Image: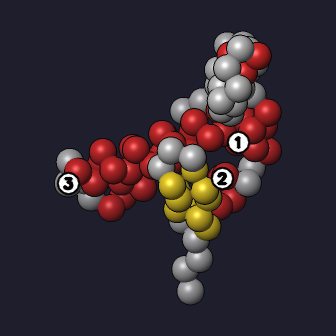
Amino acid sequence: MTRSKLIRDPIHNYVEINYNEIPIVDHPLVQRLRHIKQLQTTYLTYVGGEHSRFQHSLGVMHLATEFASHLGGENEIILTTRILGLLHDLGHGPYS
């Protein structure tokens, strides 16, 4: 039985996380992105400027999936592209 998670995204509605991606999303290095702001101190001026690197990474993963699928990529390439989109911000720290 394959299980997946749906994560509500304010821009893309729902982002599906495949069962083999759940341990990656749950990993502490990915979860720490929840506490890093994508827009630094913009939230101090604009109330809607709340956006974390975690939310951003999920959105990139979603768009990378659509991009790879649109190009007619094989399933393995699509899955690899998803993971790359998810992990592309791991090296960022606050204000980077």
Q: Position of residue 16 (x, y in %)?
A: 52, 62
User: In the picture, which quadrant includes the N terminus?
Assistant: bottom right
Along the viewing direction, whichever of 71 and 40 lies nearer the viewer: 40
Look at the picture and state if 74 lies above or below 1: above
Residue 38 falls in which quadrant of the image? top right
Q: Position of residue 56 (x, y in %)?
A: 57, 36
Could you tell me if the residues under marks 3 and 2 are in contact, i.e. CB atoms within 8 Å? no
According to the picture, the residue beneath numbered tag 3 turns out to be 72
Residues packed near mark 1 inside 10 Å, few (<14), some (14 to 19) or many (20 plus): some
Residue 22 falls in which quadrant of the image? bottom right
Left or right: residue 3 versus residue 33 is: left
Left or right: residue 31 versus residue 86 is: right
Tell which circle, 1 or 3, labels the residue nearer the N-terminal end: 1
Q: Is residue 21 visible?
A: no
Question: Residue at 42% of width from left, 55% of height from top?
Answer: 79
Along the viewing direction, whichever of 21 and 44 lies nearer the viewer: 44
User: In the picture, which quadrant includes the C terminus?
Assistant: top right
According to the picture, the residue beneath numbered tag 2 turns out to be 24
Along the viewing direction, whichever of 68 and 5 lies nearer the viewer: 5
According to the picture, the residue beneath numbered tag 1 turns out to be 30
Say what amino acid the circle numbered 2 marks: Ile
Q: Is label 1 in a helix, a strand or a loop? A: helix
Q: Residue furthest left?
A: 72
Say what amino acid the circle numbered 1 marks: Val
Could you tell me if the residues under marks 1 and 2 are in contact, i.e. CB atoms within 8 Å? yes
Q: Is label 3 in a helix, a strand or a loop? A: loop
